[in-house]
Image (cartoon, grey):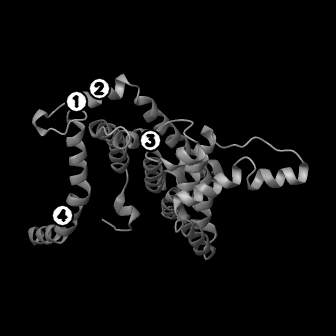
């Protein structure tokens, strides 16, 4: 009977496996193949050629990678700190009002990321909405915060806010109220309850939200271009330049593969420590 259920499960999953193979694995294989082609020569006969990977170190492409990973890490930490109180309120306090907050956050996703970032550019630019009104009332202006690293991180936090908030709220909802109440009755402080009860039991939501936010922020491009004015060059910008202006597909593929391998290793490590059955509410 177990073998029959196993075969039926595999048969049921076969269409999805085919879709994942064609839409996810096949493009990765193509990119990996391009990354070991001779640079600027589309020749399968000379595979493998790792010169594109050598260029990654020789021409300093690791610097954009470090910028991307560093800003992604900082924005993820900020997102966690900002989203935790709101996610806790959504899961434990607001109750019916949670639906209103959810709709308010989700509606922002209906508008293109680029349009929302352009809105911030118009708001924060010299002579823009804020500086223009400030000058009208005080007669003095102030320096625009645009085209600096902090505003890029702000853009990452702003854009990827929902991707941390909702998994975090789901993780906090998994924490039993009885456990928190019992700890309080035994004399635990709020900090001890947070450290010993909330954080460990909400770990699946924390890991998923952090991974989503970090992965998306590490590959982000619009924030550095629109808000940062390319003050710093991120790895996604280097990949785009290699594929378009440089017409160096092996180099672009190699840069992509380096980012994919790093992000993939981190994602696998994080997911391996998450109880997915607990997240989706399925008991073993």
User: What separation in Å lies between label 1 and label 3 (alpha carbons)?
Assistant: 21 Å
Q: Which residue is mark 1?
A: 50
Q: Earlier in the sequence, mark 2 or mark 3?
A: 2
Circle 4/circle 1 CB separation < 8 Å: no
What is the secondary structure assignment of the residue under circle 1?
loop
Q: Position of residue 279 (x, y in %)?
A: 40, 62
Q: Earlier in the sequence, mark 4 or mark 1?
A: 4
Q: Which residue is mark 3?
A: 237
- Residue 84 in sight in this render: no
Lateral position of residue 144 relative to residue 224, left or right: right
Circle 2/circle 1 CB separation < 8 Å: yes
Disc number for residue 272: none
Q: Earlier in the sequence, mark 3 or mark 4?
A: 4
Circle 1/circle 3 CB separation < 8 Å: no
Q: Nearer the viewer, residue 75 or 232?
A: 232
What is the secondary structure assignment of the residue under circle 3?
helix
- Residue 40 in sight in this render: yes
Q: Which residue is mark 2?
A: 54
What is the secondary structure assignment of the residue under circle 2?
helix
Quadrant of the snapshot with the N terminus = bottom left
Q: Which residue is mark 4?
A: 18
What is the secondary structure assignment of the residue under circle 4?
helix
User: What separation in Å lies between label 2 and label 3 (alpha carbons)?
Assistant: 19 Å
User: What separation in Å lies between label 4 and label 1 (alpha carbons)?
Assistant: 30 Å
């Amino acid at each position: 009977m177990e073998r029959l259920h196993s075969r039926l499960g595999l048969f049921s999953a076969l269409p999805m496996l085919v879709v994942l193979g064609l839409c996810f694995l096949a493009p990765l294989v193509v990119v990996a193949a391009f990354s070991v082609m001779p640079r600027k020569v589309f020749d399968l006969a000379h595979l493998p050629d790792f010169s594109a990977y050598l260029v990654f170190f020789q021409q300093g492409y690791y610097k954009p990678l470090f910028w991307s990973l560093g800003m992604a890490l900082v924005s993820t930490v900020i997102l966690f700190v900002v989203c935790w109180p709101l996610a806790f309120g959504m899961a434990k306090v607001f109750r019916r009002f949670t639906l209103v907050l959810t709709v308010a956050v989700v509606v922002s996703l209906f508008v293109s990321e680029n349009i929302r970032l352009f809105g911030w550019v118009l708001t924060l630019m010299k002579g823009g909405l804020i500086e223009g009104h400030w000058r009208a009332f005080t007669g003095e202006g102030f320096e625009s915060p645009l085209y600096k690293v902090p505003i890029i991180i702000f853009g990452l936090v702003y854009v990827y806010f929902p991707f941390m908030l909702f998994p975090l709220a789901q993780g906090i909802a998994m924490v039993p109220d009885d456990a928190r109440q019992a700890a309080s009755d035994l004399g635990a402080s709020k900090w001890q309850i947070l450290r010993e009860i909330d954080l460990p039991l909400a770990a699946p939501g924390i890991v998923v939200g952090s991974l989503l936010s970090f992965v998306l922020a590490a590959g982000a491009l619009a924030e550095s271009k629109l808000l940062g004015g390319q003050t710093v060059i991120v790895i996604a910008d280097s990949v785009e330049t290699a594929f378009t202006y440089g017409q160096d597909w092996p180099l672009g593929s190699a840069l992509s593969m380096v980012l994919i391998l790093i992000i993939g290793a981190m994602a696998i490590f994080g997911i391996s420590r998450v109880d997915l059955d607990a997240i989706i509410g399925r008991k073993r």
